[in-house]
Image (cartoon, helix red, strand yellow):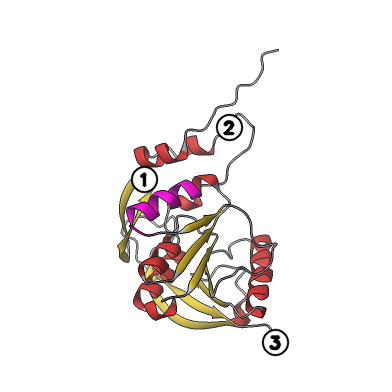
């Protein structure tokens, strides 16, 4: 019987440089990201490698509205992060981490578990001339990090993920860490505890080219009563 052949996925850094476009983000001309296009062939990065691990969907390959709106807010209100230690949770492309660094944060950390996202994040920070420390692990089960602010862009689209993230953010709030959330209104937002800070029109993932932009919102998360 012939053995199945597993295909080794290409090196993410090389693949992203060769197959994705570095371009300004809509609504964020200050930031450039490596972004997917129809000819990128992202499917190749999602194939199994020789160790047999299936990889995450390429969420990092597009600017999500929650991250984009939060990045826009931080660039417009740099006093929010100036001189402070900032964590970008579930950083993806690194858009919020990059905005934090550009806005004058004292130190920026990006937490991300997808190795392809980490590669994109690394290239994006280099392209934008900023320094970001990367933590390649799921930190949501652990204690609050040594930061002043946790920024969360668009992590409330799945119930289990939202519950895990909210529990982590509650521990952060209890430790005196501020929490900001950028989101277009996903299903599992902890809505009763959110205070609106700003709204901006930004495109959503999957919108057709030149589609009308919709408002996404920046919230602060309040402690549970």
Q: Which residues are magenta?
A: 118-130
Q: Nearer the viewer, mark 1 or mark 3?
A: 3
Marks 1/3: CA–CA distance: 45 Å
Task: Answer with the quarter of the image where residue 103 lies.
Answer: bottom left
Q: Residues within 10 Å of mark 1 (few under 14, many from 20)?
A: few
Q: Quadrant of residue 41?
A: top left
Residue 205 lies, with reference to residue 183, above or below; the image says above
Per the image, the residue denoted by label 3 is 225
- Could you tell me which quadrant the C terminus lies in? bottom right
Q: Is residue 212 left or right of residue 160?
A: left
> x and y percent of residue 177 in the render?
59, 77
Q: State which quadrant residue 166 falls in.
A: bottom right
Residue that mark 2 sits on: 49
Q: Which residue is mark 1?
A: 37
Q: Secondary structure at mark 3?
A: loop
Q: Is residue 167 above or below residue 193?
A: above
Viewer-side residue, 122 vs 114: 122
| First reached walking from the N terminus: tag 2 or tag 3 | 2
Residue drawn at 53 percent across, 80 percent down: 220
């Amino acid at each position: 019987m012939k053995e199945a052949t597993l295909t080794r996925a290409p090196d993410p850094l090389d693949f992203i440089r060769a197959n994705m476009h570095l371009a300004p983000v809509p609504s964020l001309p200050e930031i450039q990201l490596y972004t997917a296009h129809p000819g990128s062939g992202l499917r190749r990065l999602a194939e199994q490698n020789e160790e047999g691990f299936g990889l995450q969907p390429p969420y990092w390959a597009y600017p999500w509205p929650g991250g984009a709106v939060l990045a826009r807010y931080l660039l417009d209100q740099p006093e929010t992060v100036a001189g402070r230690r900032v964590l970008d949770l579930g950083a993806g492309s690194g858009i919020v981490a990059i905005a934090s660094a550009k806005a004058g944060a004292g130190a920026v950390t990006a937490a991300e578990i997808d190795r392809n996202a980490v590669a994109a994040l690394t290239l994006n920070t280099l392209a934008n001339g900023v320094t970001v420390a990367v933590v390649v692990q799921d930190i949501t089960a652990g204690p609050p990090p040594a930061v002043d602010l946790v920024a969360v862009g668009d992590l409330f689209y799945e119930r289990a993920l939202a519950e895990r993230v909210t529990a982590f953010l509650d521990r952060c709030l209890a430790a005196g860490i501020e929490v900001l959330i950028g989101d277009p209104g996903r299903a599992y937002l902890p809505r009763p505890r959110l205070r609106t800070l700003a709204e901006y029109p930004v495109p959503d993932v999957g919108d057709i080219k030149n589609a009308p932009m919709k408002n996404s919102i920046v919230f602060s998360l309040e402690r549970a009563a």
